[in-house]
Amino acid sequence: MPKVTAEYRAARRDEIIEAALRSFSQRGIQRTSMADVIESSGLSAGAIYGHFAGKKELFAAVAERVLDSRSAELEELGRDGAVPSPGELMASLLGGMSREPFADVVVQLWGDAAIDPDIRSMVQGVFAKLRGILETGLLAWASANPDRVEGDAADWARRAAPVVLGFGPGFLLQRALIDGFDAESYLETLPELLPR
């Protein structure tokens, strides 16, 4: 039997994550079964379970991929020495989230998190990582603009991160539930509302 390379395993894992994203987007997380992911992927059950023990582990991998993409976008935003403002950071983060097929399921996930301790724990982990990503960007902005913040830049970034992050649920909730919600306008207005 030929030896399986690390690259092959990584590609197969990515293929499974893509199938999970499609399934979660079509059915929601709670209504998606591992059988749905298996069917969507076209792979065998053994191939799926060889990478993921179950749906919760698969969800964690999907969330990690989404966070990695957002983190890379934020790094790119400050690539040429530019220090994005708090509003620009959040607009970039939400713009990226809105392009994810998974974004429409997030509101369902929050409802599930309120009653399922396992999902709540996963959601808290995702929010902690998002807050960390934002805090890093906010610290860079506060350090570059010391006259715009009160006190220590790191302390300000730590206090401001959950406040700035709060714009995210408002955006995603309105996008999911309000007919005619103007997501583009929301994202354009964010940098005007937060410090520049």
Image: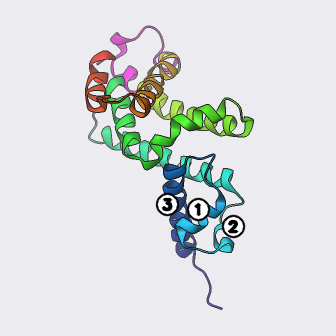
The tag earlier along the polypeptide, 1 or 3, is 3
Residue 85 visible = no
Q: Nearer the viewer, mark 1 or mark 3?
A: 1
Report the Cα–Cα distance between label 1 and label 2.
Answer: 11 Å
The residue most toward the top is 150
Give percent across and percent down for residue 196.
28, 19
Q: Assess whether residue 144 is covered by the magenta stretch.
A: yes
Q: Residue at x 28, y 36 (%)?
A: 81
Left or right of 151, for residue 77: left
The segment highlighted magenta reads 140-155
Question: Do labels 3 and 2 touch, CB within 8 Å?
Answer: no
Left or right of 7, for residue 192: left
Give the residue at mark 2.
Answer: 49
Vertical placement of 133 versus 146: above or below? below
Image mark for residue 18: 3
Element class at badge 2: helix
Query: What kind of residue is marked 3?
Result: Glu
Query: What kind of residue is marked 2?
Result: Tyr
Give percent across and percent down for residue 66.
48, 47
Q: Main secondary structure of the magenta part?
A: helix
Image mark for residue 51: none
Give percent across and percent down for residue 185.
25, 27
Q: Nearer the viewer, mark 1 or mark 2?
A: 1
Vertical placement of 55 versus 152: above or below? below
Residue 98 visible = yes
Query: What kind of residue is marked 1?
Result: Val
Q: Residue at x 58, y 38 (%)?
A: 109
Give the residue at mark 1.
Answer: 37
Q: Residue at x 69, y 67 (%)?
A: 49
Q: Assess whether residue 99 is covered by the magenta stretch.
A: no
The tag earlier along the polypeptide, 3 or 2, is 3
